[in-house]
Image: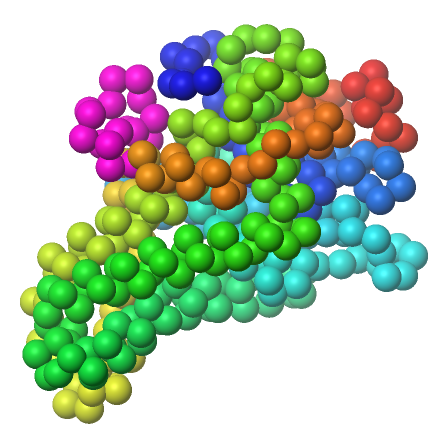
Amino acid sequence: MSGSPSPDPERPYIGGQAVIEGVMMRGPRSFVVSVRRPDGQIAIREQAWNVFFPGLRFLRWPLFRGAVVLAESLHNGYSALSFSAEHGLPPEDAGAKRHPGPAATLTFLLQALVASADAPTPAPPGAPTPKKKDPGADAMLAFATIFGVLFFIGLPHALTWLVGKALGPGFDSTSVWFHLIDGVFRLGILVGYLALISRTKDAKRLFEYHGAEHKAIWTYETKQALTVENARPFTTWHPRCGTSFLLIVVGVAVLMHVALLPLLPRLHPNDLVNQLLMVFVKVPMAFPIAGLAFELQRLSARERCPAIITWLTRPGFWLQGITTQPPDDGQQEIALLSLDRALAREQGRARAPEGVTVYGDFAKAVA
């Protein structure tokens, strides 16, 4: 299916994210995580969407909101990932709580970027502020964030620096070509990483749940009953999927780096120190880059989007060939459950109180 249905103001805007053996669906004010446990039971957690800095209205303005939504998606999404690891993985010990490992968490960071680009309009001031997480979750998320910065910002810069050392003194951080080559390395690392992990069993399952999430959203947006039968025929690709956001971020980063960084003088006479300082300059630039990329992705999902924007974002649409896979009916059930519960909360008819509920099977969860 091509195109995207026209938004209906009377129907809540719902976005989603795949987690371990499950799917998280969110609306402007709430989010729901459904996970298939190893014993076949289904664990569902329903709660309010935690909003950062709810009193600062300017953070919800265009260009500002992208970075804030990303931060909220990381915070809320990681709690969903931890919940899915606790219930979706076989426990090492009875009742033991588990956190996903570094590899799963790094993959989650990319999923959070995807989810943030597909996020509903942020909740208004007065929404709940973030709840405190346990130290283990905070430490793992911080580690994965630092590793992600080193992997997707530091590594391509280092590779470009090595190319510059081979080509000669004219090819350094003051050269436009330096930042163009840096962008090529960054794009190659991103696509290569996704292609590599897609061959692993765990990532394949994650991408199948990503496909189930898209099929569920298609079913909702075309105003059909939320059943497996109705969801099954839809494509796993969706024009509003934030996978294209990943490539938009890279493209915006290249343009901003090419336009601005060559204007900076050398920051230190020592070449190695100068390159390290340039990496530190790039890190805070990620926030305005995310803000601009967020607005471009939103624009590209509109029916009357300018043709040039559609053309520029088309490669990101193709990238869904890696990040989404056809789900089985059991995975589709989980996505539909999350969507149904999220819709019920947004419409003021919650099916269960906030917290975790465990059901024996899909039929009992629906009933």
Question: Was residue 300 drawn as part of the magenta stretch in this picture?
Answer: yes
* Residue 69 horizontal/vertical position (percent): 42, 42
Question: Was residue 187 drawn as part of the magenta stretch in this picture?
Answer: no
**Residue appearing at x 44%, y 33% in the figure:** 241
- Above or below, 176 against 344 in this view is below
The quadrant of the rendering that contains the C terminus is: top right
Tell me how the rendering is colored.
rainbow
Secondary structure mostly taken by the magenta-highlighted segment of the chain: helix
**Residue appearing at x 85%, y 56% in the figure:** 91
Instruction: Name the side, left or right, on which 142 lies relative to 284.
Output: right
User: Which region is colored magenta?
Assistant: 298-313
- Above or below, 161 against 76 in this view is below
Identify which residue, 78 or 173, lies in the foreground. Answer: 173
Identify which residue, 68 or 365, lies in the foreground. Answer: 365
Q: Quarter-wise, where is residue 262 in the image? A: bottom left
Instruction: Name the side, left or right, on which 27 lies relative to 252.
Output: right
Q: Quarter-wise, where is residue 306 in the image? A: top left
**Residue appearing at x 61%, y 57% in the figure:** 104
**Residue appearing at x 26%, y 72% in the figure:** 160
